[in-house]
Image: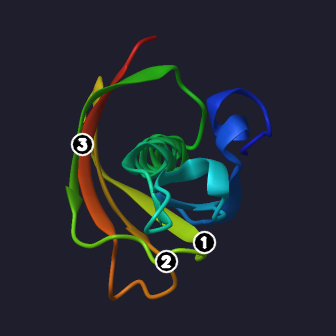
Amino acid sequence: MVRRVGHGGALGIHYVAHGAHWVELGLDYQEKLVGVAETGVLASGPIISLMDMATSMAIWMKLGRFRPQATLDLRVDYLRPATPGRRIVGRGECYGLTKSIAFVRGTAHDGDAEDPVAHVTGTFIGTE
């Protein structure tokens, strides 16, 4: 599902698990992804990329096939800084589909899904 190429490959994003309408991807802690060296906290960009990929792939799971699509909107609410040194797991879920629009939500956590780092909601448009 996730290859070590492109943007996701450069960040080291990898497959964790999936179900009928959801996908979990992982992002291991890497010094090159730290936003502020003094704190060791990951920058927001890699977490946003992780969640964009996880929610996008969740749409394919719900559809049961690949389709070309583009992110229309992805709102990210940061609830707390990620704990330095910990892997981030992003879980994306597709909870609604129309002919051309998919509705998604998800969370990113660093070990405890009940204490998320961020929550996302968004929409994608099919481009086929």
Residue 110 numbered tag: 2
Q: Residues within 10 Å of mark 3 (few under 14, many from 20)?
A: some
In terms of depth relative to the viewer, which is nearer, 38 or 69?
38
Whole-angstrom CA distance, mark 3 to mark 1, is 23 Å
Farthest front residue in view? 38
Q: 15 above or below 117?
A: above
For mark 2, give the secondary structure: loop
Q: Looking at numbered disc 1 in the image, what kind of residue is underneath it?
A: Arg
Residue 10 numbered tag: none
Q: Which residue is mark 1?
A: 87
For mark 1, give the secondary structure: loop
Residue 122 numbered tag: 3
**Rendered image coloring scheme:** rainbow
Q: Looking at numbered disc 3 in the image, what kind of residue is underneath it?
A: Gly
Disc 3 to disc 1: CB gap under 8 Å: no
Answer with the quarter of the image where residue 59 lies: top left
Q: Name the image quarter holding the N terminus.
A: top right
Disc 2 to disc 3: CB gap under 8 Å: no
Residue 69 x, y percent position in the rendering: 44, 22
Is 64 left or right of 39, judged from the image as shown?
right
Q: Residue at x 53, y 25 (%)?
A: 67
Q: Residue at x 41, y 13 (%)?
A: 127
Is 54 left or right of 18, judged from the image as shown?
left
Disc 2 to disc 1: CB gap under 8 Å: yes
Q: 126 above or below 106?
A: above
Residue 23 x, y percent position in the rendering: 54, 59
Whole-angstrom CA distance, mark 2 to mark 3, is 21 Å
For mark 3, give the secondary structure: strand
In terms of depth relative to the viewer, which is nearer, 2 or 41?
41
Whole-angstrom CA distance, mark 2 to mark 1, is 6 Å
Q: Looking at numbered disc 2 in the image, what kind of residue is underneath it?
A: Asp
